[in-house]
Every structure is written in C-alpha cells, then in structure tokens.
C-alpha cells in the first residue's frame, strides 16, 4: 500500500500532463489484469500503463481539490476493464474511497455491480481489501466512518486498511441517498475517485436551454461538493456532449485520455472500411414504417436468420457449443414492433423445424435446404473455417433446439435478465434496452431496420453492439442495416477517427482540454449530440470535394510569406507570352451588366 507521503510529487520528470506518478505493480491492479487477461503479459502491461496515465492526471492522494477528466474508448472496446484497473490502482496508491456511477436502469446497474466485484476479486477467499456497497443509504454511514477512521490510525498495518467501493445507479433518488450519506461523514484526509460510466448519457444537464438543472446533474454536483478531495473520470465511447458543453460547467473535463483497444478488437473501421462485405442493406420495401406495413418476415430477415443458424451449427461442430452465439434484432423503439418481430421469428423457426423433419423427397424440405445452401455459400466467402454444408446439415436441428428467442424490453414488467450460461445461442429482439452499456455475448448477426430518427451521432453509434473483440469469428458476422443508418455509420467512422486523433494529440502534449478548439468533421445529416445539453450553438461549415474560394485568409505572417514565396517560384518557372485574344464577338447577349451577372453565376457554379 502507498500512502500520500510516498507518492511521487509533481516534478519536471513527469510525463506531460501528469500531476503525480502512481506506483504500478500493486496487488490489486495486477490482480485485475491477470484475472481478465490471463497468459497475455503484454496486454496486462498495456492496460496497467494506461491506468497509471489516467490516475496520474487525477488529484494526488492527500491533496485537497477536485479534477475532471475524460476517458474515451471505442464502443464495446474494454472501457469497463480500464476503469476497473484504474479503481484497483487507486486502491494500491492509497485512495480510501472509490465511487462508480453506472447504469441508468436496474438491469444495467446490477450488471455493472456484479462485473466490478468479480473483476476486483471481491470474494470470501481473498483478503478483504475492499468493502463494497451498492446504492448505500444514510444507515451505512457508521460502518463507513469506522473504515475511514482506521486509515487515520498510524499503528494499523496497511494490510488491514480497506477501501470503500460504492456502486450507485445513475438515478436521482439513489444519488440523493448517496449525497446524504457522504455529507454525514468526516472526510478530512480522505481521497476519493468517482468514475462515471457512460458519462455522456444522463449525467449532463439536460435542461440547459431552460436555464435550469436536471435532477441527476444536480445530484452529481452535490456529490462533488461533499467530497473535499476527489477526481471525476468520465468514461464514454461517444464524447461529443462532454466536449461541447460550456467549458465553465463543472462537468466539463480538464484533461483527456484515449484508450487503445487490443489487437482482436473489431470496430467501425473493420466493418465499414476493411470488410464491407459483412454489412448488408435492408431494401427500403422491407423496412417497416407507418406507410409500409409488412405482412410477415421480410426476406432480408430470413436471410439473416439463415446466416445465424448456420453459424450456430458451425459453433456446435467446431467448439462443441462453448461460449455463446447471439443475434440482435433491433427494429424500433416501439415495443409493439418488438412483439411483431418476435412473433415472426418464432413462427419462422417453428416452420423450419417442421420442414426439416420431413422426408428428403419433400418439396418444401428441398426448397428450404436450397435456401440454406445459398446462405452457406455466402457465409463461406468470409468464414474461412466454415465446415462444408453436408457436415453442418446434421447439426441444424440442434442449432434450432439450442437457440432461445427473447423479447428484451419492459413490455411485460421488469427488466429481462439473460442467463448466458443457460443456453448456447440467443436471438434478442428489442430496442433501447439493448443500446448503450448492454453486453450481448457472442454477437454475430445484427438486424437493424431502425432509422436514424433525429440523427444524433452519439446515439446512433451507441447502437453498435456488433462491435467488440470478435476477430476470431469475424467471418461469421453479418450486419443488416437500412440505407440511412448504414450511411450514418460510415460517416461516423471518419468523424470518430479524426476526433480521436485530435484528442490523442491533446493527451500526448499534456494540454488542458479547455485549450483545445472543438472542431469536428461530421456528415451534414448528423448532429453531434442532443441539443438539450448545449448552452451555445455550434457553427457548421459545409465542406465538399469541390474547389471553393474563401472570402479572406486567416494566417500568420510566416505562413503568408511562405505562400507568396511558393507562388513567386511557380510563376518564375513559367514561360509566358502575350496573347492577342479572340477577335470574335462575344456569345452573350443582353446588356453589359446582364453579361457580368451571368459570368458571375457561371464562376460560382
């Protein structure tokens, strides 16, 4: 354990932007990466080094004050592992309190709590270095205060000190209870770390245009006010909103770190640039809308189901059904449409099962097997280890039997909890409940006829549950999108890569994030984020591949001098001769002023 007296202070030897140098190699952080990345020492070192860079920008343990930082990853790229390692490293370096604000629903909050405790190794068979609370109340204050008091006892060995871990649902009532609890404690010399998962979602002030404060935002401000020494780390894959809020807002980040995924990560570049054959367009006539009511499952959905079932059969043959295979169907935000798609898929599966039981001479069975042969041929183009169709044929029946179809929404009441260990293959039908923060194990096929709605880029990107560490089975993946959504994802890839490059530059230079000029490249059909969190309008400039003439040039004197030198050298290299001109009469008719106006229009064109 490291107390504040042993922490390396701010000095010229530190990397740019660091306030202090966390000591790495402690039992907690090392334990996390070893449990999550066994037999991958290089990956373990990379995760710990990134965690140290993040924590080193935080308030040092024992120092009063507050800091706010932004940590940016890709969708489904391992942000949870990052902030778990940062939390463990904070424990190794003498932080007494770690608060994780995660999950805006009971389901997601519980998922975060359970995963965090598992990854931190909070089990009865390990030393009790952590004491964990979930959505604590004022009644827990006495126990927590006694733990903090032990940190002030110099006679107590470090091995006996415990760090308080609080997981709290991102919901105003639970946050109010936490504020009341924290406000009742003696926090002198207590250093805290707050980690806000999916920080761009509910944390920001959604009532900026009205000049008021949304409740969850106000509770977070109250929590920060109650902690004399703390750092707030905002984790997200879509940082547009935190970057565009007013920089004097207390939730506006002062520093940024950009996470790099592992080598087997598959994201937007892989799907929409490197392997576009994995992405398919849902024809407009097969997209359900108010003006296009579908009578049954469209052919593109049947095609996606065939690809998925063949992948399940391949998994049963090659891996004996280890792990999971899943398909996500995201038709709409409306639960009525979820029910419709759920019924279609259930009926299709029942019919396919019935036909497969028929004799080989049955005409319906021959037709069904032919459609599966065509799907197999398509899948074989990208899945190098796909067994021959005749080999998979005897696994098709088991593939259907080992696939559960579930409607994931609140139409029937409480949250739907998927027990991934109960079944090998799953088809999940739903909408917003499977967006941000929801983990779909072994996702291979995505069918999403849903459009872009208001066109918020961050919201659309958060629907990309098909990203993740899928390199091993990438060839089995298929993504079906309607045209507008496909175009939005393609545009987002360029936007995301340019934005990440800019943020990396800021981080590497150790620049304050407030000094960085917010300038994004974004398709005109998209907005960076919801307008409700923005106090000031952003300015959009239309940029195309055509030549354009600026009205004036804003450059420094050195740039202007260089430009003039280049132009002069170019002109001096030319051999110019006087041209007498064309003696034919002008082709334009009308007055001189009309001719000038016409020339001007042609020039602008």
Image (tube, rainbow, N blue to C red):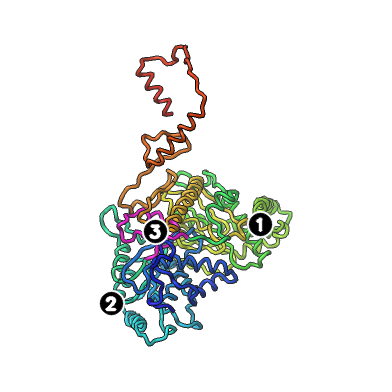
Q: Is residue 432 visible?
A: no
Task: Give the mark nearest the N terminus, 3 or 2.
Answer: 2
For the N terminus, the quadrant is: bottom left
Q: Is residue 275 visible?
A: yes
Real-space CA distance between mark 3 and mark 2, rounded to the nearest whole angstrom? 29 Å
Question: Which of the pair 508/384 is nearer the observer?
Answer: 508
What residue would you read off at disc 1?
355
Q: Are marks 3 and 2 in contact (CB under 8 Å)?
A: no
Q: Dot 3, crowdedness within 10 Å: few (<14), some or many (≥20)?
A: many
Real-space CA distance between mark 2 and mark 1, rounded to the nearest whole angstrom? 67 Å
Q: Are marks 1 and 3 in contact (CB under 8 Å)?
A: no
Q: Position of residue 237 (x, y in %)?
A: 45, 58
Q: Are marks 2 and 1 in contact (CB under 8 Å)?
A: no
Q: Residue furthest left?
A: 211
x 44%, y 45%: residue? 523
Foreground label between 1 and 3: 3
Foreground label between 2 and 1: 2
What residue would you read off at disc 2?
184
What residue would you read off at disc 3?
200
Q: Which region shows up in magenta?
A: 232-258
Q: Dot 1, crowdedness within 10 Å: few (<14), some or many (≥20)?
A: some
For the C terminus, the quadrant is: top left
């Amino acid at each position: 354990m490291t107390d504040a007296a042993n922490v390396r202070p701010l000095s010229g030897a530190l990397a740019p932007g660091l306030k202090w140098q966390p000591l790495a190699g402690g039992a907690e952080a090392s334990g996390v990466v070893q449990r999550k990345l066994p037999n991958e020492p290089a990956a373990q070192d990379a995760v710990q080094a990134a965690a140290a860079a993040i924590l080193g920008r935080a308030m040092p343990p024992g120092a009063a004050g507050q800091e706010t930082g932004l940590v940016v990853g890709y969708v489904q790229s391992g942000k949870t592992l990052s902030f778990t390692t940062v939390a463990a490293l904070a424990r190794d370096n003498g932080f007494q309190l770690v608060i994780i604000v995660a999950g805006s629903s009971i389901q997601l909050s519980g998922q975060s709590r359970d995963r965090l405790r598992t990854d931190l190794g909070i089990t009865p068979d390990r030393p009790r270095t952590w004491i964990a609370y979930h959505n604590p109340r004022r009644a827990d204050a006495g126990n927590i205060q006694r733990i903090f008091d032990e940190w002030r006892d110099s006679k107590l060995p470090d091995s006996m000190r415990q760090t308080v871990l609080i997981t709290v649902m991102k919901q105003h009532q639970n946050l109010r209870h936490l504020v009341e609890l924290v406000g009742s404690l003696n926090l002198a010399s207590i250093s805290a770390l707050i980690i806000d998962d999916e920080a761009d979602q509910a944390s920001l002030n959604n009532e900026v245009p009205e000049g008021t404060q949304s409740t969850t935002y106000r509770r977070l401000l109250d929590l920060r006010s109650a902690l004399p020494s703390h750092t707030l780390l905002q984790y997200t894959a879509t940082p547009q909103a935190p970057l565009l809020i007013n920089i004097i807002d207390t939730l506006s980040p002062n520093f940024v770190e950009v996470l790099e995924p592992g080598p087997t990560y598959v994201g937007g570049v892989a799907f929409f640039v490197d392997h576009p054959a994995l992405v398919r367009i849902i024809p407009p006539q097969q997209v359900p809308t108010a003006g296009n009511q579908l009578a049954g499952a469209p052919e593109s959905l049947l095609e996606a189901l065939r690809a998925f079932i063949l992948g399940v059969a391949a998994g049963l043959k090659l891996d004996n059904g280890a792990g999971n295979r899943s398909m996500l169907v995201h038709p709409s935000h409306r639960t009525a449409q979820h029910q419709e798609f759920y019924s279609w898929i259930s009926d299709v599966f029942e019919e396919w099962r019935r036909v497969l039981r028929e004799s080989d001479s049955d005409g319906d069975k021959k037709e069904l097997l032919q459609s599966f042969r065509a799907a197999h041929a398509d899948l074989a183009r990208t899945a190098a280890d796909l067994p021959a169709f005749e080999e998979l044929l005897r696994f098709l029946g088991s593939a259907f039997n080992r696939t559960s179809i579930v409607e994931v929404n609140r139409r029937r009441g409480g949250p739907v909890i998927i027990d991934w260990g109960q079944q090998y293959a799953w088809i999940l039908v739903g909408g917003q409940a499977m967006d941000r923060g929801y983990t779909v194990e072994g996702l291979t096929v995505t069918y999403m006829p849903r459009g872009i709605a208001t066109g918020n880029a961050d919201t659309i990107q958060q629907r990309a549950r098909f990203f993740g560490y899928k390199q091993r089975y990438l060839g089995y993946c298929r993504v079906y999108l309607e045209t507008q959504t496909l175009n939005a994802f393609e545009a987002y890839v360029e936007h995301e890569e340019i934005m990440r490059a800019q943020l990396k530059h800021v981080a590497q230079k150790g620049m304050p994030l407030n000094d960085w000029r917010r300038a994004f490249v974004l398709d005109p059909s998209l907005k960076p984020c919801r307008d409700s969190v923005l106090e000031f309008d952003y300015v959009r400039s239309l940029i195309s591949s055509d030549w354009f003439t600026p009205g004036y040039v804003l450059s420094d004197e050195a740039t202007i001098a260089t430009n003039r030198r280049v132009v002069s050298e170019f002109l001096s290299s030319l051999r110019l001769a006087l041209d007498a001109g064309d003696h034919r009469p002008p082709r334009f008719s009308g007055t001189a002023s009309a001719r000038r106006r016409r020339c001007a229009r042609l020039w602008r064109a």
